[in-house]
Amino acid sequence: MIMRKKSGLTIVEQAIVLVPEFESVVHRLEQQVVLRGQSKSTLNNYIRRIALFVVHFKQLPEQIDPEEINDYLVALARDPRSPSRSSFKHMVYGLRYYFRLLGMNKNAIALPSLKKDTKLPVILNREELKELFAAPTLLKQRVVLALIYSAGLRGQEVINLKISDIDFERKTIHIRQSKYKKDRVVPLADSMALGLKKYLSAENPHIWLFNGKEPDGRYSVRGLSWVMRENLKKTSITKEVNLHSLRHSYATHLLEQGVNIVTLKELLGHADITTTMIYLHIAQCDLVKAHSPLDRLYNYRSK
């Protein structure tokens, strides 16, 4: 079956329009099928699934953070609009095939297992976060971990931050050219602003907010992950969490505090709200009893 949308283009054609490099990927996949004598129908299914992925993210799979891919697959598996379990399976199989074709076997192995249900993101509660932020002895480490949670940042976004991206007067953080090549602005918490000012005064970094050992003077995502792992060891936290768990915690806690899902999507910089909706399965939001808006119009309350 050819997957088309109202535009008249197939899903593969849409993916090529959005990401022209995808056309060469399709050719490589087609060549591999010929060389390996594999089923053409299976290949076409894989290509369509990868195309759906490319249309969603507007990037090729290898350009996407593995944690973000997992979040997307979890959302896909739980999306009531998804036609069947098989569509999720074909997406995973297609991505595995794609990553192995590129020689990225680690990425293929990291994809969710099809034998068991996909796991929801693990988050830290408020007491666990306080314990984690109190663990580092170095000011720089305390500030960087708190900043990721306070603004829901991806690791790559943290290391890309420049000092000039922090606006203390307007209380904002400007995230430039993030994952989807789209700038966004997120609030700067008052308590975070105090921590950053203290850090800037003590460390006096140049250009980049967090200096590191990378050739261009930046910190590295690997370095951030190390900071998270080492400081977790100093706490009583036993959950299987990583750096990205701070972003998950940010999103979940905002939902629980009443931020609506559309606003959260923009704050997180998601390309599609389907990815954001995974947090609805984690957040412990107060349920509002179903009612007619007419009662609220006249402030009527039943006895």
Image (cartoon, helix red, strand yellow):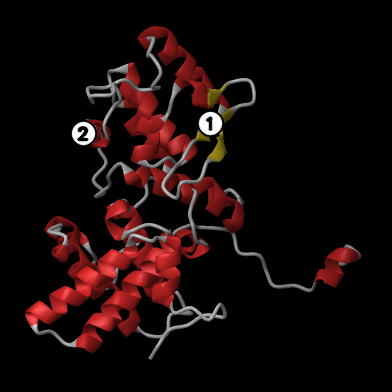
Categorize mark 1 by other alpha carbons within 10 Å: few (<14), some (14-19), many (20+): many
Q: Give the vertical position of 155 relative to 120 (above or below).
A: above
The amino acid pointed to by label 2 is Trp
Total residue callouts:
2
Q: Is residue 92 above or below residue 19?
A: below
**Which image quadrant: the C terminus?**
bottom right
- Give the residue pinned by disc 2: 226
Apparent side of residue 9 relative to residue 50 in the rendered image (left or right)? right
Say few, some or many: other residues with alpha carbon within 10 Å of mark 2 (under 14 / 14 to 19 / 20 or more): some
- Residue at the spot 58% in from the left edge and 30% down from the top edge: 172
Q: Can the viewer see residue 234?
A: yes
Q: Picture quarter containing residue 45?
A: bottom left
Q: Where is residue 65 in the image (x, y as percent from the top left)?
A: 31, 51
As drawn, 75 above or below 264? below
Left or right: where 287 falls relative to 101: right
Q: At 40% from the left edge and 87% from the top edge, which residue is drawn?
A: 2
Q: Mark 1 points at which residue?
A: 173
